[in-house]
Image (cartoon, rainbow, N blue to C red):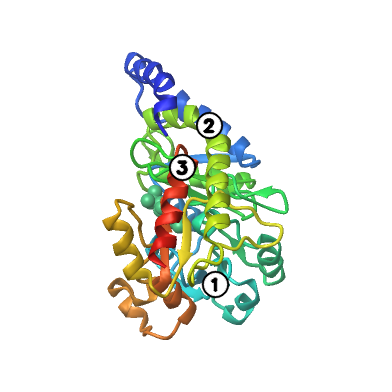
């Protein structure tokens, strides 16, 4: 997928070497403007990675010890870790089994006097039911921090991810839909005060060199990565469309095969298919069969956060979040990336049919 941008990246690299400016310069400024515009937000702050983006977003809202943040029970652990790193407690809410995104109907029951924010995660590329989530947040005066790491470009009712929450984080980890050539991330927001705080926090708590207003951290987006991301951003919509076409073909060819469950997209939502996740009770055997046929698959994710050793302190046990556990036990991610051909997708589907 990166072959078609290589020709553009090389001059950018040469320019970077010649400029000799490596940290917080024009390239970062420019990319921040471009990414804010892509997300239809007023502001963007580049940071070092997606986890930091979420941590800094929570810090700008002054969420900390004693506070609770509602998170999905079936997300990548980074969403929970961001909440833990600011000293707050992640409060899991189960997804809809159809879309794998947080079920808005279950959120209110999880709200307590300590709840400060909701962190919807647009899992596998599909935008969450943001109208319902924002309505609950407004009613209870909670902040919303979108975890937009897997869903750059997805929409709900025509509005794009990264533009719903009060302040939102995304990741440009190389494997994401918009990937850098190393670690990178960004924060998006329409709130000037919050984004100003984010700029301060990411740079040691300083706006004026060697004068520190708060105890910040070092989490800056590299100039080099920003330059590369600017070039790749121009291709993002095209790459997302390729992913959607592949997903359509998979869905068409795999519907009704064995006990395979293909992804469901909620009404009014779109997905940019960061992953194409099917479910089957025969997951282990199917994965092994596909491996033997030379088809690489992955499991996102084999163990939900509440059962991870890292979260043993919260005292959850098996059975506490049955939908998250069911997804973990049955999900399988099929190959999906721009450039994967129709023939290759057909071969994968035929192989799955021959297994069943
Ligand atoms: C990748 C990812 C992150 C973290 O991004 P990094 O850049 O790897 O720190 C956070 N949340 C979700 C859902 C992700 O998939």
Task: Answer with mark 1 or mark 3, whichever residue precedes in sequence.
Answer: 1
Which residue occupies the extreme top position in the image?
A: 18
Task: Answer with mark 3 or mark 2, whichever residue precedes in sequence.
Answer: 2
Vertical side of 351 occupied by 320: above or below: below
Q: CA distance from mark 1 to mark 3?
A: 34 Å
Q: CA distance from mark 2 to mark 1?
A: 31 Å
Question: Horizontal placement of 134 versus 254: left or right?
Answer: right
Quarter that holds the C terminus = bottom left
- Could you classify mark 1 by the number of other residues whose Cα lies within 10 Å: few (under 14), some (14-19), or many (20 or more)? many
Describe the element under mark 1 as helix, strand or loop: loop
- Please name whichever residue, 197 or 211, is drawn nearer the observer in this view of the structure: 197
Q: Which numbered dot is residue 95?
A: 1
Look at mark 3 in the image and give the residue it sits on.
343
Which of label 3 and label 2 is nearer to you? 3
Quarter that holds the N terminus = top left
- Could you classify mark 2 by the number of other residues whose Cα lies within 10 Å: few (under 14), some (14-19), or many (20 or more)? some
Q: Residue at x 61, y 78 (%)?
A: 106
Task: Answer with mark 2 or mark 1, whichever residue precedes in sequence.
Answer: 1
Describe the element under mark 2 as helix, strand or loop: loop
Q: Quadrant of residue 85?
A: bottom left
Q: Position of residue 118 (x, y in %)?
A: 57, 66
Look at mark 2 in the image and give the residue it sits on.
235
- Could you classify mark 3 by the number of other residues whose Cα lies within 10 Å: few (under 14), some (14-19), or many (20 or more)? few
Which residue occupies the extreme front position in the image?
A: 354
Q: Position of residue 230 (x, y in %)?
A: 49, 29
Q: Residue at x 39, y 56 (%)?
A: 351
- Please name whichever residue, 180 or 42, is drawn nearer the observer in this view of the structure: 180
Describe the element under mark 3 as helix, strand or loop: helix
Vertical side of 240 occupied by 234: above or below: above
């Amino acid at each position: 997928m990166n072959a078609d941008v290589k020709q553009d990246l090389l001059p950018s690299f040469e320019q970077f070497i010649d400029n000799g400016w490596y940290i917080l310069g024009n390239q970062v400024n420019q990319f921040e403007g471009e990414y804010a515009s892509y997300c239809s937000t007023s502001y963007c702050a580049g940071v070092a990675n997606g986890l930091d983006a979420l941590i800094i977003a929570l810090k700008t809202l002054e969420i900390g010890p004693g506070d609770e943040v509602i998170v999905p029970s079936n997300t990548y652990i980074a969403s929970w870790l961001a909440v833990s790193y600011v000293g707050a407690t992640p409060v899991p809410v189960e997804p809809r089994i159809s879309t794998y995104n947080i079920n808005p109907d279950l959120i209110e029951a999880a709200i307590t006097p300590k709840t400060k924010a909701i962190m919807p995660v647009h899992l596998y590329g599909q935008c969450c039911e943001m109208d319902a989530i924002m309505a609950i947040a407004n009613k209870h005066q909670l902040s919303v921090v979108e975890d937009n790491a897997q869903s750059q470009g997805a929409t709900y009712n025509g509005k794009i991810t990264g533009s719903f929450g009060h302040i939102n984080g995304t990741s440009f980890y190389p494997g994401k839909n918009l990937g850098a050539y190393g670690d990178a991330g960004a924060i998006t927001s329409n709130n000037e005060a919050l984004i100003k705080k984010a700029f301060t926090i990411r740079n040691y708590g300083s706006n004026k060199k060697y004068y520190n207003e708060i105890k910040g951290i070092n989490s800056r987006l590299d100039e080099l990565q920003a330059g590369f991301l600017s070039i790749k951003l121009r291709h993002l919509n095209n790459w997302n469309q390729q992913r959607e076409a592949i997903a359509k073909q998979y869905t068409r060819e795999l519907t009704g095969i064995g006990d395979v469950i293909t992804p469901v997209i909620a009404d009014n939502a779109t997905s940019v298919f960061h992953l194409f996740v099917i479910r089957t009770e025969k997951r282990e055997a199917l994965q092994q069969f596909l491996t033997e046929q030379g088809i690489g698959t992955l499991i996102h994710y084999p163990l939900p956060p509440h059962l991870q050793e890292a979260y043993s302190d919260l005292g959850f046990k098996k059975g506490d979040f049955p939908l998250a556990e069911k997804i973990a036990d049955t999900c399988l991610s099929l190959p999906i990336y721009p450039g994967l051909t129709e023939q290759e997708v057909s071969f994968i589907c035929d192989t799955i049919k021959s297994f069943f």
